[in-house]
Image: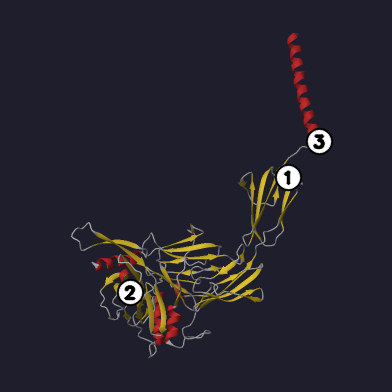
Amino acid sequence: MFKKFLTAALACAVFGTVSLTAFAETDESTAESQQKIEYIYTEIAQNRVNSTLFEEIIAKQIVFYSNISNGAVIDYPVTLDLPETVSVTVDKDGKKSEYTRGEPFEEPGKYSLTLMVEGKDLLGGSEDEVYYGLFRFWITEKSEEGDSDGESSDIEDSESSEDSEFSSGDSSEDISSDGSDTSSDSSGGEGEKPSNPDDKDTEEQGILLPKNDKASLLSQYATSEKIRVVTDGGTVFFSNVPAGTVTTNNVKLEYPDTIEYELLKDGEEQTSYAFGNALTEDGEYTLLIYDGDDENPAKFGFTIIGEYAGSITQYAVPEGCEIEKAMFGKNEIRANKTFVDLGAEGEYTFDISCGIYKWTESFTLDNTPPEFKVNGLDSEGKAQGVTVFIELISDDIDTYTIIKDGETIKKTLELTDAGKYYVTVYDKAGNSFSQTFDIIYQMNGMAIVAVVLGGALIVAGLVFFIITRKKFNIR
């Protein structure tokens, strides 16, 4: 009977990590008697004990040990020390694989392990609950070349195994903190290389970051050069910012060209987005990865605010990251690790770290609305038959809109047509200011006299015509 639970949980691992509900037959004689089983996804927490031992915790209570971190790419056997209360099913290269408890994983391939704990084995758990988590790793072929101690070959194999996912080859390029591409020579360079296997593992695999509300159905690992993201469906891609970041930098995403994805900006699909291009426009972005259940894709979200920011009182970083240094102008200000309360308007700079990955954010806080002036109006806000000129006063104005009689018209700073106008000006920080006014045409005294005389002449002409016609008829 429990094999049915394992099969259902494995299906959940492949097609999504949402809570599932299944029905299992009980020992009663009638088929109608069933027990409702709820499958609950749980993150596997991880602590590094030393360079070759990791402590893993499932369902926040059950502890097991491994010689690698969750999501690692290695070229040596993997061992797991699982307690009896943890059941496991193994998926290797997308197919179900047999596994004998206690034996190491030695054959090359991509492994996805579904680990399950029954609720009755947990403190406060229920008999109708099964908690499950995912433990993934990739065993690559050993390189035939390398140092005698095998350390350099470990790194090279890890790099080549990750790069093999990207047929375009773009993924092998590193992403710097400002979004530009950099490349590093494995034999040296300005940066200091790790000096022991533990540092090399961290450098290549990265440090696992905590989950946040902008990332779902995926795990993030911080390396020294970029963020490595692994979805629960097995897709690997890279970013120069972690999920949940509010950034002033351009964002570059690197992923396989065979990926099925959708990019949203402010909730709308970006159909014109070109693969591999940096994202530069301000907005709230969400990258959806479809490699499992199409109704529950993996999500990776972030926000770009640009170099000017308005209407914000606090700057915060995602969980697992820290603000190491905060500056206002040339003065250092207090940072509360994960957030900084913003005060006066001006330039702010933050040095941020997520594990061993570091980058800098800098923006100008501006909460002051832009200024403009409408020339040619009287005290009542009306223009009497003259041209109205809009004068842009602030030097940080980004754009403006003009609405005439309820309809948006072409941008111009000179207005002559009669109508009711509504002008809004925006600055680079998103602040705005609006003004309404009317342009009307009012006749002066001479124009009125001319109209009256014109009317009188028309009337006189009609009278003359009628009298002349009558005289003609009498004759």
Position of 331 with respect to 173 (left or right) is right
Residue that carries the numbered disc 1 in the rendered image: 382
Image quarter (top left, top right, bottom left or bottom right) of the N terminus: bottom left
Please tell me whether mark 2 or mark 3 is closer to you in this view.
Answer: 2
Residue positioned 25% across, 74% down in the render: 98
Whether residue 114 is visible: no
Residue 37 against residue 381 in the figure, above or below: below
Residue positioned 59% across, 67% down in the render: 314
Give the amino acid type for the residue marked by disc 2 in the picture.
Tyr
Give the amino acid type for the residue marked by disc 1 in the picture.
Lys
Residue that carries the numbered disc 2 in the rendered image: 111
Horizontal and vertical percent position of residue 122: 34, 72
Mark 1 Cα-neighbour bin, 10 Å: few <14, some 14–19, many ≥20: some
Give the amino acid type for the residue marked by disc 3 in the picture.
Gly
Disc assigned to residue 445: 3
Farthest residue to the left: give it. 29
Please tell me whether mark 3 or mark 1 is closer to you in this view.
Answer: 1
Horizontal and vertical percent position of residue 47: 42, 79
Of callouts 3 and 1, the N-terminal one: 1
